[in-house]
Amino acid sequence: MKKHKLEEWIFRLIMFFSTVLIVAALLLILVSITMKAWPALSWEMISQVPHGGYYFGKEGGILNAIVGSLILAFSSTFLALLTGLPVALVLNTSLIKRKRWVYFIRYILDLLWGVPSIVYGALGFSIMIYFGLKTSLLAGIITVSIFILPIMIRAMDEVIKEVPLSLHEASYSLGATTGETAFLVIIRQCFPGIATAVLLSFGRAIGDAASVLFTCGFTDFIPDSLNEPAATLPLAIFFQLGSPLPEVQARAYASAFILTIIVLVISILSRIISGKLNKNKINF
């Protein structure tokens, strides 16, 4: 009995120190970025585009990167949702009895989830070269949507597969088709988890730099169409932090601060939405 208590005490201590370490790392990142970004943060920094080039222009702000990141993240997340939600539903409805196929598809998705984002960027860049396309917002949206698609599908799949088979059978017994069961019953039951998966995928989309490095390009201006290059906050940090000018480096830290705040807000919203929407679930 004493041995079990000792093991429990040891693992609790490990969990405590792990939690402290993670929280300390998060606070260190937040404090470091805030201290370097705070002197540069102003309304002009948020409401203006950079002047004179993103390497050497001392004036202006990061509005182009904020707008570009939001357009890229919203569009790619929406495109991935349109593709990923039906796949997750099919895995848990039409293919639910073909377990070998389901396991194989999940294994492939897990492999794609683990592929570094730079590989997706290189793939998108190779396709662009083959078809003679130039860097553009559209190319970035397509590349990022492919990058977050396995993440979104697996996140939704893990939620949907927890729906009990009795709910499927009850729906079929009332005369519902497979499609009606999937879109009218299962989605309602799993909506909190689906919303969380979408928000987490949005966070990955807005925070990734490697997948858009070769496909989306960079510009000081807000794009007027999908065929023009677009700036993003991760690339703004990457490019501007290498500038020799302190004013440009300050814009990089301001970009890092705003990007961190957006990701934190998304994480908090995913928790809040998941908690509030759980009341719509049917308890068994």
Image: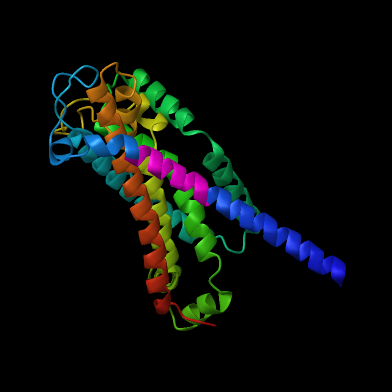
Magenta span includes 33:
yes
Is 17 part of what is drawn in magenta? no
Relative to 83, residue 163 above or below: below
Residue at image x 34%, y 54%? Answer: 265
- Scheme by which the image is coloured: rainbow
Q: Position of residue 45 (x, y in %)?
A: 17, 36
Dividing the picture into quadrants, the one containing residue 138 is top left
Look at 42% across and 71% down and name the residue there.
275
Residue 92 visible in rendering:
no
Pick whichever, 16 or 236, lies toward us.
Answer: 16
In this view, 176 is above or below 214: below
What's the residue at 86%, 66% (across, down)?
A: 3
Which image quadrant: the C terminus?
bottom right
96 to the left or right of 132: right
Q: Nearer the viewer, residue 274 or 6?
A: 6
Residue 262, image x, y percentages: 32, 48
The quadrant of the rendering that contains the N terminus is bottom right
Q: Which residues are magenta?
A: 23-34
Confirm whether residue 194 shows in the render: yes
Image point 32% across, 34% down: which residue? Answer: 36
Q: Residue 216 at x, y = what percent?
A: 30, 29
Q: Nearer the viewer, residue 67 or 248?
A: 248
Q: Is residue 251 left or right of residue 169?
A: left
Residue 206, given in percent of the width and then of the height, sits at 34, 42
219 lies above or below 70: above
